[in-house]
Amino acid sequence: MIILRSIADTRAALDSWRRRGQTIALVPTMGYLHEGHMSLVDEAKKRADRVVVSIYVNPTQFGPNEDLDKYPRDFARDEACCRARGVDAIFYPDNAVMYCPDHSCWVTEESLSQTMCGAARPGHFRGVTTVVLKLFNITRCDVAIFGRKDAQQALIICRMVRDLNVPVEIVVAPLVREPDGLAMSSRNKYLSDDERRRALSIANGLNQATALFAGGQRQAAALCDLVKTGIANAGGNIDYVVVMDRDSLRPLATVDRPAVLAVAAFFGKTRLIDNVFLD
Ligand SMILES: Nc1ncnc2c1ncn2[C@@H]1O[C@H](COP(=O)(O)OP(=O)(O)OP(=O)(O)O)[C@@H](O)[C@H]1O
Ligand SMILES: CC(C)(CO)[C@@H](O)C(=O)[O-]
Ligand code: BAL
């Protein structure tokens, strides 16, 4: 496994694979890897000859009062995880490699990013789409794998690729949970034992809402209320609980088409997201 720190080295290594006719899958991450990320690596291995994991905590997707500085980082551990899982290369740039001091070009998606995390974190998706397009251009990967935990992000990246004719196939892989149901996330590390226990109310609420939906409930408000009550009773601070059309991310009053029930909530200072599909 090779560690690539510069764009020139990355291009040279990946070009040499391409010259041998090998295809390349990219798994973009912010590091502090867990089994959710590793499931994306497994998916990548099925879809290409070579797998590159990028590890970069992208400053342009964090708001001024967010957790950029304290975001968990442990490159040695990440390197060991990737090596054990058969990753071919880690692209591990620093800020000077990724952004020129006078960087002034941005990619903005102007529809899907208006709601949910886009509304709660102004500028967040502009940072995401910009850095993801840069990662695609640097690696010229054939396929890129994203997780459904960040369902809105995945949808926005698919839209960017479609609208800007980016020659990359996007694969969205399933959400991986801890044995008790909590969605895996690097930010789970911030949770105290008590917050961790109370944060389970998110997954539990989504499970209960899924069961209610399976039993015939089609009113979005009833499904959302169930989730909100569980989180509020556990002392969580709700950012949003919404039912959205799964293609347009427009709010649904009645679930009469494929939908996503999505949550963002704080436990202590930690903001967690989770979602389930309603089919
Ligand atoms: N539990 C999970 N299941 C599936 N994919 C996941 C999971 N957690 C993260 N991913 C995916 O991994 C990729 C990198 O995400 P990222 O590095 O931000 O991890 P994260 O655990 O979501 O961190 P955080 O939410 O704390 O920022 C994204 O495509 C994301 O959707
Ligand atoms: C896609 C991504 C790596 C871009 O920084 C990030 O938003 C993430 O980890 O989901
Ligand atoms: N996985 C989303 C990255 C972020 O929260 O900034």
Image (cartoon, rainbow, N blue to C red):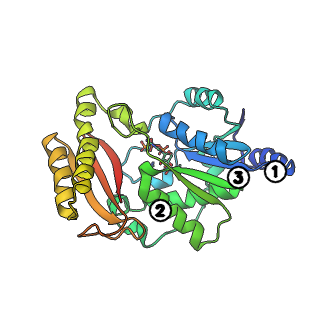
Q: Are marks 1 and 2 in contact (CB under 8 Å)?
A: no
Quick one: quadrant of the C terminus? bottom left
Q: Which residue is mark 2?
A: 155
User: Rounded to the nearest whole Å, what is the CA distance between mark 3 and mark 2?
Assistant: 21 Å
**Can the viewer see residue 93?**
no
Q: Is residue 65 above or below residue 217?
A: above
Of the residues shown, which amino acid type is indicated by label 3? Answer: Thr
User: Rounded to the nearest whole Å, what is the CA distance between mark 1 and mark 3?
Assistant: 11 Å
Which element carries disc 3, helix, strand or loop?
Answer: helix
Q: Percent from the top left, x then y, of residue 9?
A: 77, 44
Q: Percent from the top left, x then y, of residue 67?
A: 39, 43
> Is 11 or 228 nearer to us in this picture?
228
* Comes first in the chain, label 3 or label 2: 3
Which residue occupies 35% across, 52% down?
A: 276
Which element carries disc 1, helix, strand or loop?
Answer: helix
Identify the residue at the far right of this view. Answer: 19
Q: Which residue is mark 3?
A: 139
Q: Percent from the top left, x then y, of residue 113?
A: 41, 66
> Is 178 or 278 nearer to us in this picture?
278
Of the residues shown, which amino acid type is indicated by label 2? Answer: Leu
> Is 231 or 237 nearer to us in this picture?
231
**Can the viewer see residue 276?**
yes
Which residue occupies 61% across, 72% down?
A: 164
Which element carries disc 2, helix, strand or loop?
Answer: helix
| Camera-side mark, 1 or 3 | 1
Q: Which residue is mark 1?
A: 18
* Comes first in the chain, label 1 or label 2: 1
Q: Percent from the top left, x then y, of residue 236?
A: 20, 43
